[in-house]
Amino acid sequence: MRVIGEKGEQIGVLPIQQALERAEKAGLDLVEVAPSANPPVCRIIDFGKYLYEVEKKERSARKKQVVVHVKELRFRPKIGEHDYQTKLRSAIRFLERGDRVKVTMMFRGREAAHREGGIRVLERLLEDLNDYSEVEKNYTLDNQSIVNILAPRKKSSRKTVTKSVGLDQKTNTNASQENADEENSSLNDVGADGSGDEDVQE
């Protein structure tokens, strides 16, 4: 067998009895570390210390492991806006902490034959989550549901502008209100009393 000394030095190929005598003389143990090698490799070391080092490396490796959970959110084609927003926020929270999200669209009765509404809800959800996720897998189960598995999008590929449902509508409404205020301001520059006061609604 090939023998490695206490300090990692190569001693060479020795008969097993001679290797054992060397280990005993050093007050250490002869430990086989590579049994599948040709010839097998043994080290002259403190076996207790060796076990401690192995356990320490295993603990360190476990600490570095990232545990990914899969969270499921179930939707219906006629989901209300409040419920939709609640589930959307939950999905964003799950994705931001690194979990995958399983989105299931459930169909019941006649809904299975008219799935357009459910598909529209899913398309809206995927659009709203586009900055946070990417579709990892999608499939249909027994014609009664559509499932999408969403994985967190890498931060480097996220857009700098955060989207949320209703944000565009709110922005457009505010823009329209501002335009209307500007027009009213132009008309009211000269009032009946010549004061030209303007009431701006923000």
Image (spheres, helix red, strand yellow):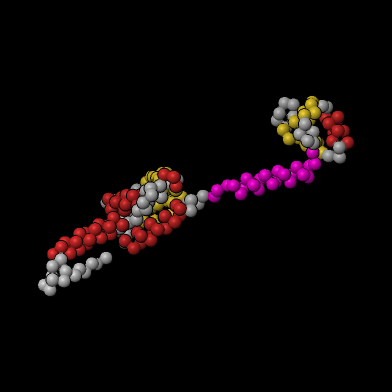
**Picture coordinates of residue 88, whole percent (x, y):** 38, 57
What segment is highlighted magenta in the picture?
A: 45-67
Q: Is-magenta flag for residue 46?
A: yes
**With 72 as the anchor, is 38 left or right in this view?**
right
Quadrant, the C terminus: bottom left
Q: Is residue 141 above or below residue 178?
A: above
Q: Residue at x 31, y 61 (%)?
A: 81
Q: Is-magenta flag for residue 109?
A: no
**With 188 as the anchor, is 31 left or right in this view?**
right
Q: Residue at x 41, y 44 (%)?
A: 157
Name the residue nearer the viewer: 114 or 81: 81
**With 163 as the anchor, is 173 left or right in this view?**
left
Q: Is residue 90 above or below residue 198?
A: above
Residue 109 makes an appearance in the image: no
Q: Tell which residue pokes out farthest to the front in this image.
A: 194
Q: Residue at x 35, y 53 (%)?
A: 163
Residue 155 makes an appearance in the image: yes
**Picture coordinates of residue 140, whole percent (x, y):** 37, 46
User: In terms of image quadrants, where is residue 61?
Assistant: top right
Name the residue nearer the viewer: 117 or 57: 57
Q: Main secondary structure of the magenta part?
A: helix
**Picture coordinates of residue 138, whole percent (x, y):** 39, 45
Q: Residue at x 82, y 27 (%)?
A: 14
Name the residue nearer the viewer: 2 or 143: 2
**Picture coordinates of residue 41, whole percent (x, y):** 75, 31
Name the residue nearer the viewer: 79 or 197: 197
Q: Tell which residue pokes out farthest to the left in this image.
A: 192
Tally of marks: 0
Q: Tell which residue pokes out farthest to the bottom in this image.
A: 193
**With 165 as the anchor, is 45 left or right in this view?**
right
Quadrant, the N terminus: top right
